[in-house]
Amino acid sequence: MELNLAVELHKNLSLPNPLIIASGPSVKDDEDIVRGLEAGAGGVVTKTITYDVNMQVQPKPRMYIIDKYSALARTKFYSFYSIDLMSQHPPEQWVELMKRAKNEIKKKKLEGVVIASIAGRTYEEWEKLAKLMTEAGVDALELNLSCPHVDPSRPELMGRAVVSNPEIVVNIVKRVKENTNLPVIGKLTPHGANPLEVAKTMVKAGVDILVSTARFQGLVIDVESMKPILWGGLGGYGGPWQLPISLAWTYYIVKELGNVPVIGSGGISSGLDIARFILVGARATQVCTTIIVQGYDAIKVMLDELKSWMKKHNFTSTDEFRGKALGNVIPLDKLNRTKMYRYIVNESKCTICKVCIRVCPYKAIIDRGLKPPIISEDKCDNCGLCYSLCPSDAIECKFA
């Protein structure tokens, strides 16, 4: 079966596959751009380009993994905590970096697009950055209205600090659109704002494509020193645990703004996660943390996983399953409220660990000492907690 992973995000922006490396330390210069596309990414988004010198100088140290063993094992329950700021290279230097990258891309006949992430402190800076990056030859512009590190008390018009003011968002989008002929991408923040409302504001102002979503702002405290860890302040907080939150916002945005291309982001750690975003209507995805933790080799691993899943389900293109899960999301008022199931303990699997007895909110599981417990049908409320928590999968769910 021949697979076609190509994605059309905009009439002027097509990708060879739906995996884009998100703005971050993995795309900090021209060499990273080329390396990312060589590794097989469908596109790369540069580290955010800004005139703010304070944002160009990186705190040291600035990255921390919570539960490193899970991260190294590629499981879904670690967190990436960092205060990695914007690009260290001033905008004018990025013009040269971009030219070098484009020359290498052409020389090596690489596929994939290059998107410039930009952030201005004034409307004039947004305009200047839009013009500069357009002239540098990038394929699209991404507006960084999501950076979790920007202090809301500062007056700069960048990062998540501006999204609480729709008028500012509208003005930024309009100023950028007036100074470029490239597709303009708006990146949403999940922190301190309603991503759906921000998405509506951006689209109304003229954004062509949306990215949902970015990281949260967090604070990790060491209880022994009684201080924030490492760099001593707040930081961006994300990782694979964020996936269900990001999928929910993508679902809401696609459902409300179905004609606007959406790039899903936030928590992707596998090819199946890419499939999940496309199933709720995203056209492509952005990946950051997994590439930072696993390296560029993760790109091929994720794309191979996506291809295997597509073959298993007889899909030859992402268009064939995009949005397929949207109609399967049941609204709250239509959720089942009757006892349809019967939970039974499979005695051959049960290790008599008694976890189910301890956690049952309804006291429906009868302790039989050294024998496997029994679930009382009368008391059981069908909540499913014991079924999902049993460490030996000894509890079976059957229709009543």
Image (tube, rainbow, N blue to C red):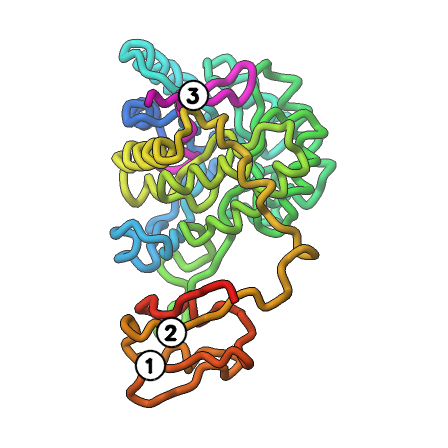
Labels 1 & 2 near each other (Cβ < 8 A): yes
Instruction: Tell me the element at label 1.
Output: strand
Residue 150 sits above or below residue 20 on the image: below
Q: What amino acid type should be assigned to the residue bearing mark 2?
A: Val
Residue receiving disc 1 = 372
Residue at image point 33% right, 51% down: 61
- Of the image marks 1 and 2, the number of the one nearer the N terminus: 2
Quadrant in which residue 199 is drawn:
top right
Identity of the residue drawn at 35% across and 42% down: 270
97 displayed left or right of 332: left
**Nearest the camera: 21 or 322?**
322
Looking at the image, tell me whether mark 1 or mark 3 is earlier in sequence order.
Answer: 3
Q: Which residues are magenta?
A: 1-27
- Mark 3: few/some/many CA within 10 Å (<14, 14-19, 20+): some
Q: Amino acid at mark 1?
A: Pro
Residue with the most extreme front position: 400
Question: Mark 2 sits on what residue?
Answer: 345
